[in-house]
Structures are given as structure tokens and as C-alpha cells.
């Protein structure tokens, strides 16, 4: 078994353990189902495509972190994650920023997944144009996600403030999209070269 396969197996095992923990007495069962469904669908999609289109180790690690964040957020709700409550008190912040952390990785996940597909399929070869497209996709996905949450709350007649984790911030949706944009930006600035090396390694091995 190759190192990449061992890494994926390890992350899958850890993910299953975190999933079981997350499912035990979550703070809000409706929120848990909603948050975990996204994590489950993402993990299932990667499992289904693993043999046909294996990703770079960097992509799998970023996705693993994002899924873990979703499971933790689902268990506690994004506005009540204990460790970030402690950070809030120590730094005298107005809100628990775990949801910002989650949206940051949402941007990174979209950036790495779409970039990997676009680069490996040769869709875009110009690096500047590639960056622009990745930014647009990340922001578009974030905006669609926020709209989906909004309509989901209305259809299910849920408490919009608690469900969206606004914590009294009327600009919460805007900050969420900004966090996703920042995640994509950080990925492109600091992780793109590492990503390119791993993509070349996959191509060299005929994957």
C-alpha cells in the first residue's frame, strides 16, 4: 500500500471516529443533521471518485480538516464551540469565531478541489487567469451556500439567528464570504507551489 493510500485510510478512520463522537448527544439535533450531511456528502464523493480521479495528499488533508470542522460545528453548533469560547473570553472578542474558521477552510477546499481539476485536465494554463477563476468559483460557492442556508431556514421555520450562527452580527453573511475568499487567497499564495509539485508527482506516476 502506497503512502498516499495509507494517509487516506488513516484520515478515513479518524473521520469515522470523529463522526461517532459528533453524533453522541449533539447540542441541537436539527443543526447536527444539517451540518453533518454536508460532511458526509463530501466524504462520499471523494470515496466514490478515489479510483477514477485520485487527488493530491494536500487536497485530501485540507478536505479532512474541513470535514472535521463541520463535525465539530455540528456537535456543538458553530456559535458554542468551547475552545473558541475560551479564545473569545481571553481576547475579549464579541463573538465565537469558529464559524469564520469553518468558512475559511470552505474557501480552501473549493480552491484546492477546483484547481486540481482545472490544472490536471488542462482547462486553464495561464496562472493569472487560473487564480481569477478560482477566486470567482470560491466566492460564487460561498454566496450560493449562504443563500441555501437562508432559504432552508425559511422553509423549515427555524430560528434564523441561531441556525446561521449570526451571534448578533448583521454582517455575518458578508464576513462568512470574506473568510472563504481569504481561505482561497491563502491557498493560492502559500500552497500553490506545493500543490503543483504533488500534481506533477501524480502525473509522473500515471495517476
Image: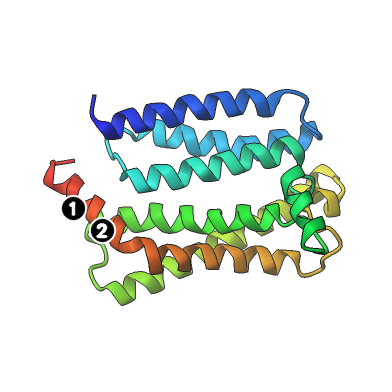
Measure the C-alpha gap from mark 1 to mark 2.
6 Å
Q: Which residue is drawn at 39% across and 52% down?
A: 113
Name the residue carrying label 1.
200
Q: Is mark 2 on a helix, strand or loop?
A: helix
Left or right placement of residue 49 versus residue 147 in this view: left
Q: Which residue is drawn at 81% across and 34% down?
A: 27
* The quadrant where residue 11 appears: top left
For the N terminus, the quadrant is top left
Left or right placement of residue 124 versus residue 37 in this view: left
Task: Give the class, few, some or many, for how many residues have Cα within 10 Å of label 1's Cα (few <14, many ≥20).
Answer: some
Residue 120 point in image, percent of width and height = 24, 54
In the rendered view, how is the structure colored? rainbow
The answer to whether any part of residue 120 appears in the image is: yes
204 or 45: nearer the viewer: 204
Q: Residue 196 carries which label?
A: 2
Q: Which residue is drawn at 77% across and 62% down?
A: 91
Amino acid at each position: 500500500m502506497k503512502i498516499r493510500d495509507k494517509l487516506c485510510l488513516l484520515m478515513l478512520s479518524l473521520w469515522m471516529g470523529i463522526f461517532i463522537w459528533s453524533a453522541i448527544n449533539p447540542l441541537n439535533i436539527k443543526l447536527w443533521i444539517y451540518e453533518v450531511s454536508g460532511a458526509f456528502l463530501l466524504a462520499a464523493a471523494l470515496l466514490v471518485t478515489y479510483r477514477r480521479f485520485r487527488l493530491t495528499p494536500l487536497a485530501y488533508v485540507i478536505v479532512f480538516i474541513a470535514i472535521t470542522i463541520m463535525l465539530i460545528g455540528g456537535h456543538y453548533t458553530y456559535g458554542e464551540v468551547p475552545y473558541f469560547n475560551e479564545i473569545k473570553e481571553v481576547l475579549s472578542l464579541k463573538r465565537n469565531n469558529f464559524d469564520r474558521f469553518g468558512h475559511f477552510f470552505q474557501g480552501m477546499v473549493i480552491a484546492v478541489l477546483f484547481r486540481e481539476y482545472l490544472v490536471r485536465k488542462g482547462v486553464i494554463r495561464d496562472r493569472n487567469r487560473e487564480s481569477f477563476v478560482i477566486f470567482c468559483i470560491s466566492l460564487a460557492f460561498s454566496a450560493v451556500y449562504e443563500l441555501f442556508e437562508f432559504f432552508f431556514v425559511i422553509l423549515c421555520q427555524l430560528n434564523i439567528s441561531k441556525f446561521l450562527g449570526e451571534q448578533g452580527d448583521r454582517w455575518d453573511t458578508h464576513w462568512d464570504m470574506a473568510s472563504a475568499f481569504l481561505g482561497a487567497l491563502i491557498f493560492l499564495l502559500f500552497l500553490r507551489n506545493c500543490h503543483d509539485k504533488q500534481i506533477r508527482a501524480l502525473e509522473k506516476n500515471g495517476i
